[in-house]
């Protein structure tokens, strides 16, 4: 179990670094649509309103739109990778 948490932490940090290089310190809804494979930005907006977006987003003063941190996105993506990897190992 400890090995999995070390793997998860390393993967989160690698994904976060990649996201920061590509998007900077804030990730907007259009980027989230791309990262989480939503068909449109409007679909991301609806998912947020319905509480179905897998991360929390926030509005910032003097900025239009909703934003997420690269760290929160990286955590969700790394957990998803680890979960799907575990499921593949269990399935015949």
Image (cartoon, helix red, strand yellow):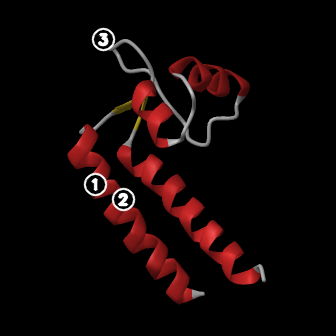
User: As displayed, is residue 60 above or below residue 85?
Assistant: above
Assign the N terminus to one quadrant of the image.
bottom right
Q: In this view, does 90 lie above or below 52?
A: below
Q: What element carries label 1?
A: helix
Question: Nearest the camera: 59 or 31?
Answer: 31
Quadrant for residue 86, please give it: bottom right
Q: Which mark is residue 15?
A: 2
In front here: 90 or 16?
90
Which residue in the protein does label 3 denote?
62
Residue 29 lies in what quarter of the image? top left
Measure how far apart labels 1 and 3 are at the Cα level: 27 Å
* SS of the residue under disc 2: helix
Residue 59: x and y in percent read 44, 21
Q: In the drawing, what numbered circle is on residue 18?
A: 1
Image side of residue 58 versus residue 54, left or right: left
Q: Nearer the viewer, mark 1 or mark 3?
A: 1
Q: How many marks?
A: 3
Q: Is residue 80 above or below residue 19?
A: below
Q: Where is residue 21 in the image (x, y as percent from the top left)?
A: 21, 48
Cα separation between marks 1 and 2: 5 Å
Q: Distance between the residues labelled 3 and 2?
A: 28 Å
């Amino acid at each position: 179990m400890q090995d999995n948490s070390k793997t998860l932490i390393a993967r989160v940090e690698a994904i976060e670094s990649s996201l920061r290089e590509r998007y900077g310190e804030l990730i907007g809804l259009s980027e989230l649509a791309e990262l989480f494979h939503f068909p449109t930005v409007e679909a991301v907006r609806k998912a947020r309103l319905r509480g179905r977006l897998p991360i929390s987003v926030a509005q910032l003063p003097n900025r239009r739109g909703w934003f997420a941190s690269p760290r929160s996105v990286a955590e969700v993506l790394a957990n998803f990778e680890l979960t799907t990897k575990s499921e593949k190992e269990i399935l015949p």
